[in-house]
Image (spheres, rainbow, N blue to C red):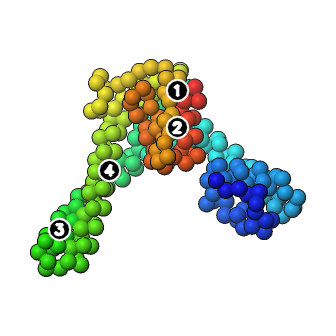
Amino acid sequence: MTQYSSFSDSELIEVLQLLDSLSHVAKEQLLKEIQSRKNQEIRSFISDLSKIISEEKENIQSLTYIKNLGFDVTSIDQSNYTITRSGRAILIDVIAIVLGTILSVLGIFGVIFLLSFSSPINGIVLSVFGYIGIKMLINGINRIFDYFGFMLQIENKNFTFKRKFDLPSGELKDKIQSLKISKSEDQISLVYKDTEIIKVGAPNAINSSTLEAIISLN
C-alpha cells in the first residue's frame, strides 16, 4: 500500500498525471493526501479526483463493473435484478478451449521431437506451448462448467441461484443475508454455505466492492 505522505510535492504531481493507472484504494489515499497539502497546483486536482472516486463508487453500487467479472446484470431496481454470464465471457471461454486444444496438440509434437532427439530446440518450444495450452484448456473447460446455466436472481431480499451440473435440485433459494464474501490472497468469492456462486481471481478493491454490493444493495 503506497504511503503518499512521504512523497514530495513534485512526486505527487507526477502521480496525479497517472490517475488512470491507480487502483480505487490508491485514489482514495491520494485524495486524502492532496487535501492536506498547501501547494495550490496539487490542490487543483482535488475536484477532478473527488469526481473520479465518486463515479467509481456509483458504478460499484450500480453493479456497472460486474461486466469486468464476466457477467451481465438486468436491473428493474436496486432490490430486483438478475445476474447472468455475459456472452463475451462465454466467447472468451470457447476461444480458450479451442486455442488451448491447438497448443496442446503442438505440445504433443514437442514431446515427440524431444524423445526422438531430431529437433530438441523445436521440441522445447512446442512443449512450452503445449503446457500453456493445457492450462488454457483446463481453465476454459472449468469456467464453462462452473457457469453453465448460471443465473443469480435477487428479488426483495431473497435470491434464487441456478446453475447446471453441481446443484442437486438445479437451484438454491434463500435470504440475501445468507450470502457471504470469502477472501484469500489470490481470490474473492460470493458464497452460499459451501457453494461458490461467483469467484474472482483478481481480488482488487473494485472487484471486492462489486461482489459486496450484491449483498449490500438489499
Q: Is residue 203 left or right of residue 56?
A: left
Q: Would you name the residue on which mark 2 appears?
A: 211
Between the residue at mark 1 and the residue at mark 3, the CA separation in whole angstroms equals 54 Å
Between the residue at mark 1 and the residue at mark 4, the CA separation in whole angstroms equals 32 Å
Amino acid at dot 1: Asn
Amino acid at dot 4: Asn
Q: Position of residue 30 (x, y in %)?
A: 73, 54
**In the figure, 89 relative to 109: above or below?**
above
In this orientation, does residue 103 appear?
Answer: no
Between the residue at mark 2 and the residue at mark 4, the CA separation in whole angstroms equals 22 Å
Q: Do the residues labelled 1 and 3 touch (CB within 8 Å)?
A: no
Q: Where is residue 62 in the image (x, y as percent from the top left)?
A: 59, 38
Q: In the image shown, does 113 or 217 lie closer to the viewer? A: 113
Q: Would you name the residue on which mark 1 appears?
A: 80
Mark identifier at residue 111? 3
Amino acid at dot 2: Leu
Q: Classify 10 Å Cα crowding around label 2: few (below 14), some (14-19), many (20 and above).
A: many
